[in-house]
Image (cartoon, rainbow, N blue to C red):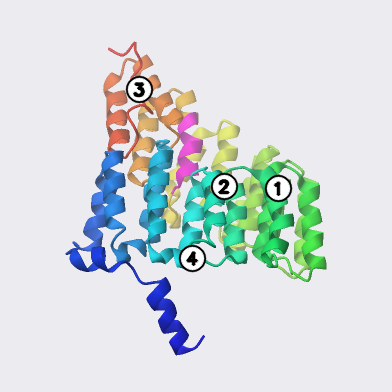
Amino acid sequence: MSSLSRHLYRSFCTATPATPETSVAWPPLNTIISDLFNERNFETLVNKFKKSSEYHRFRCRHRIYEVTVRRLALAKRFSCIEEILEDQKKYNDICSEGFAIRLISLYGKSGMFNQASQTFNQLPELKCPRTVKSFNALLSACVDTKNYEKAEPLFRELPSSLSIEPNLYSYNIMIRVYCEMGSLDSAISVLDEMEKSGVSPSLITFNFLLNGFYEKNRFSDGEAIWARMENNNLVPDIRSFNAKLRGLVLGGKTLEVVELVKELETKGPKPDIHSFNALIKGLCNDGDLEVAMRIHKELNKKGLIPNRSTFQTLIPCLCEKGNFDLALKLCKESLNRRHFLHAELLQTVVDGFVKKSKVDGAKKLMELARAKGYSESSLKMPSDAE
């Protein structure tokens, strides 16, 4: 692209509306973002977000879009999500495929496939090109919304009509689709197809397959995929080993999980939080909650931070043992780290406190959940609470 072409593109496809941008004395961007994070009224949040979107620098911040949309999705405020994202289409940023992909992806992650598909179909009239990148975003929306049955027709029909060639990412998405559907033979067929098309599978390709086979407790088939991966001169990474660890947990082979994690600590690749989550899961399955909690306490020493999965595994086990005080402690730790637990799990802890006549503990958890963005309807005090 010549310098003149670049200048014209910036002028007509990436420029923002002059009036809102130049006539408003915007506060510091971090102040705007902090205000949105702290806003608890969803209608007010939507209005503030739309107003802030007039600021070009705000529209460049992907993270605030992701966090806001996730909050609204957790609260099932899908009309609010649509109001925010549809409002973005009036800005000239939509000429950029990257900006359009963001909208498609956010719709997908919110479970709103129809809106994601509609946005993809609107791109030509919005003067935005459709390449394999936005095509892949639409395929990913099929995965995110679990509309797996829509992925194959799109994969087979759209590339020819749009004159695009599926790339490695496209094939990887389809392999993931079939793995999540449990159609593992179809996933292998896609692997064969991509190799025949001259597209070399990547480590990500094989990691999807490893996850698929190990999670279906087809351990021997998983090992065959492992061998095929190594035959392609690909070195397993920690994600590959984590898939195997989860397969071992599913097979009830906790001792082998312990041994493999120890081996990884000494020989590598270094185990990550997902590795230890598998170990914690195996121990909890075997009833070794005390050991699982000890590993949780040692994570910081290993330079690892517990994630949502860590808490989602440990808290139910603590509830089963009747240890609601420790369950509350982990709930607080999780929420303070901005890990949003299932509302049903928090309700289990609340109910447990009430049954033990510890209403104060239930109230503390509900207050914290409200402060972190859970809606009034997502957590309720049992009717038999004092």
Classify 10 Å Cα crowding around label 1: few (below 14), some (14-19), many (20 and above). many
Q: Write down the residue under mark 1.
A: 179
Work out whether mark 3 precedes mark 4 in sequence or the reverse, and give the earlier one.
Answer: 4
Residue 271: quadrant of the picture = bottom right
Mark 4: give few (<14), some (14-19) or many (20+) Cα within 10 Å: some
**First in sequence: mark 2 vs mark 3:** 2
Coordinates of residue 342 in the picture (x, y in percent): 45, 34
Q: Which mark is residue 380?
A: 3
Residue at (47, 58) in percent of width and height: 102
**For the point 32% across and 44% down, which residue is it?**
336
On the picture, is 67 further left or further right than 223? left
The residue segment tinted magenta is 306-316
Ranked by sequence position, the earlier of labels 4 and 2 is 4
Closer to the chain start, of discs 1 and 3, is 1
Dot 2 amino acid type: Asp
Do the residues under discs 2 and 3 have CB atoms within 8 angstroms?
A: no
Three-letter amino acid code at the position of disc 3: Lys
Lower sequence index among marks 1 and 4: 4
Q: Is residue 312 magenta?
A: yes
Give the camera-side residue of 178 and 294: 178
Extreme residue in the left direction: 25
